[in-house]
Image (cartoon, rainbow, N blue to C red):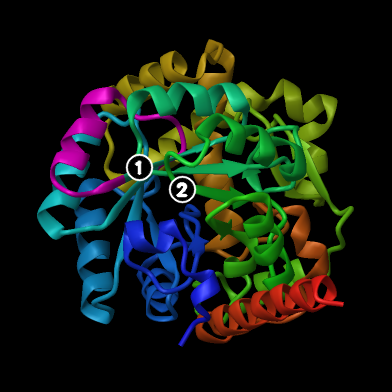
Amino acid sequence: MIDPRLHTSFCELVGVEAPIVQTGMGWVAGPSLVSASAEAGALGILASATMDFDQLKDAIAKVKARTTKPFGVNLRADSADAAQRAELLITEGVRVASFAQAPKRHLIDMLQSAGVAVIPSIGAKRHAEKVMEWGVDAILVQGGEGGGHTGSVPTTIVLPQVLDVVDGAVPVIAAGGFHDGRGLAAALAYGADAVAMGTRFLLTVDSSVPDEVKKFYLGYGVADTVVTTQVDGVPHRVLRTPMVAKLESAAGKAMSIPRSIANARRFSAMTGLGYSEMLREGWAMKASMGLSWGQTVMAANTPMLLKAGLVDGRTEAGVLASGQVVGVIDDLPTCAELIDRITTGAVSALDRVQSRSET
């Protein structure tokens, strides 16, 4: 039984026991991790950006076969079949739709009218102002410490800004730098309603990432990540590896466009996506994110470079997304052990604060 002090408005909204979110990491957040997170009392989020529609349908079925508890699916708002995927979530009774970028208003209305909570991820105060106008159900705000696509403002600065904008209207989920109970207690003290973690869940027994890759991660320190734009044209926090150094070199930058075109072909062959559909998605991404054509072409790198490391286990040839928190993680617990450890640690931290106030 989780301490009542940890039962927040976020728990009420999505029907979970613990105010903890396992983020929708591409190639990582599959059925095994999502169902294990859900069974442990957190909100597991299935990553769908690297899946075609049929693969997503199959993955949802696998999660539902392993757990009856609530879970979510991360959608790309700019994908050509975003509305079809939203309809699938509604049909399958998925509790949460999360988005890396703000979804269109019609998608929000479609999902909310069917009882699906809409939770976009943001990285700046101005983004919070925008999505609040659209009437989302909760907001996930990630500070610069977080892995994958990230901003430059630390969590301790951007979180209070977003909380001031939201002013209690919807739950706020804090992300970027969280891995233990002290972090959860601190986020709650700021006024957040939950924490979200990617790297910490990647480094669990239930993650499908190859064991040798997990051990590779455990060898890195807090200063061993780098934010690069050479993966897909926008800031991306990854482990500092020889492959990333190569991408960052003058020769690597010169080859970014040809490499991206080659990776687009590989992704098309792997997923069955036709070039016309990829072009439509690329155009939508360019419009929604304000990318240049060069950045849009480079975005084709992301799925294949991440797959090489996180699925194929080729740490020398792939890119490994990671938050700075990798440097303070030294073990591989199950999701159940992790959630229990975090909630117990948060209660202990809250008890310490209370005992100090009473002396």
The x, y position of residue 292, in whole percent, is 56, 11
Eyeballing the image, is 135 above or below 318? above
Identify residue type, mark 2.
Answer: Pro
Which of the 4 image quadrants contains residue 211?
Answer: bottom right
Q: Nearer the viewer, residue 273 or 286?
A: 286
Which residue is located at x 43 percent, y 27 percent?
131
The x, y position of residue 242, in whole percent, is 82, 49
Q: Residues within 10 Å of mark 2 (few under 14, many from 20)?
A: many
Which residue is located at x 63 percent, y 83 percent?
344
Disc 1 or 2, which lies upstream in sequence?
A: 1
Asked whether residue 107 is drawn in magenta, I would say yes
Eyeballing the image, is 312 above or below 322? below
Mark 1 and mark 2 in contact? Answer it, CB < 8 Å. yes
Q: Nearer the viewer, residue 203 or 261?
A: 203
The x, y position of residue 207, in whole percent, is 52, 73
Eyeballing the image, is 255 above or below 171? above
The residue under label 1 is 137
Identify residue type, mark 1.
Answer: Asp
Q: Dot 2 lies on which element?
A: loop
Residue 121 in sight from this viewpoint? yes
Q: Residues within 10 Å of mark 1 (few under 14, many from 20)?
A: many
The x, y position of residue 307, in whole percent, is 53, 54
Q: CA distance from mark 1 to mark 2?
A: 7 Å
Asked whether residue 122 is drawn in magenta, I would say no
Q: Dot 1 lies on which element?
A: loop
The residue under label 2 is 171
Eyeballing the image, is 284 above or below 308? above
Which residue is located at x 51 percent, y 20 percent?
296
What's drawn in magenta, residue-wise? 99-117
